[in-house]
Amino acid sequence: ILNDLTHGKHDYQTIIIDTVTTLEPIVASWVCAQNGKSSLDDFGYGRGPNAALEEWRRIINALEMLRSKRGVGIHLLGHVQIRKFNSPDVAVGEFDRFQLQLHEKVAGLLRQRVDNIFFAQNEILSAVKDGKTKGISTGVRLMRTTRTAAWDAGNSLALPATMPFTYADYAKAKAAFGTVNPTDLAAEAERLIATLTEEHQATAREYLGKAGTDRTKLAQLIDWTRARAAGV
């Protein structure tokens, strides 16, 4: 299908995979069928997930080729689940966070290869009634664009940390990024850098010097400093 979309005749501007969570068992079944196995476990210890990972690499490479050749926007949707996260920082220890509902190797590959990661959720407010705290959903859908201890996210478009979860808002913000003055991005980066620890300030200012007037690099620095400022 991806090969047909890359080389065939069509006028599609956007391709959406809904969802990578659903696609994962399909990929696993394909890999097993190609190798005469009934399950990934039949490959031997650790070999099954690695074989599936190679197929995922081919899929990502094909998607990147499609985008490069035809200018098609690629959007990957995925479900999350709450998992225990063991922080390397002993002082922090173990805590729950939202993580992609995928094998960790596949999730890691996707995080590495995509340009932006957004976390979508319904807005929930807390209220105290009869001495008990309850969660109240407002019905508003939000998109988080910066990583926190609770979820993975990140962007290279200098997006607000939280924005409405609509394609119209995203498209508007993406278009605005193309015209933003790099000097304004550098100034925002400087403002955020000032809130960091001395160690992180040194790292951030070194990167700021290398970024120059590159909008994407400056946006990535802003995203990084926001996450550091939040203690992530």
Image: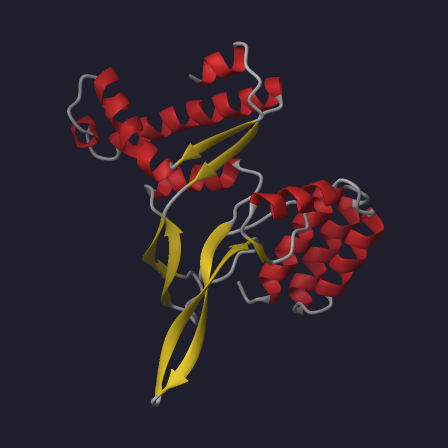
Q: Answer yes or no: is residue 43 visible.
A: yes
Q: Residue at x 61, y 22 (%)?
A: 68
Q: Quadrant of the N terminus?
A: top left
Q: Residue furthest front?
A: 139
* Quadrant of residue 64 within the rendered picture: top right
For residue 23, above or below residue 201 = above
* Quadrant of residue 213 within the rendered picture: top right
- Nearer the observer, 215 or 112: 215
Q: Residue at x 61, y 44 (%)?
A: 168
In the rendered structure, the answer to whether residue 194 lies left or right of residue 223 reads right
- Nearer the observer, 92 or 195: 195
* Whole-percent x, y for residue 107 in the image: 40, 41
* Quadrant of residue 115 within the rendered picture: top right
Q: Answer yes or no: is residue 152 visible.
A: no
Q: Residue at x 66, y 48 (%)?
A: 220
- Nearer the observer, 199 or 226: 226
* Whole-percent x, y for residue 6 in the image: 53, 15
Q: Residue at x 63, y 60 (%)?
A: 226
- Nearer the observer, 20 or 39: 20
Q: Residue furthest bottom?
A: 131
For residue 58, above or below residue 88 = above
Q: Residue furthest top?
A: 8
For residue 142, above or below residue 89 = above
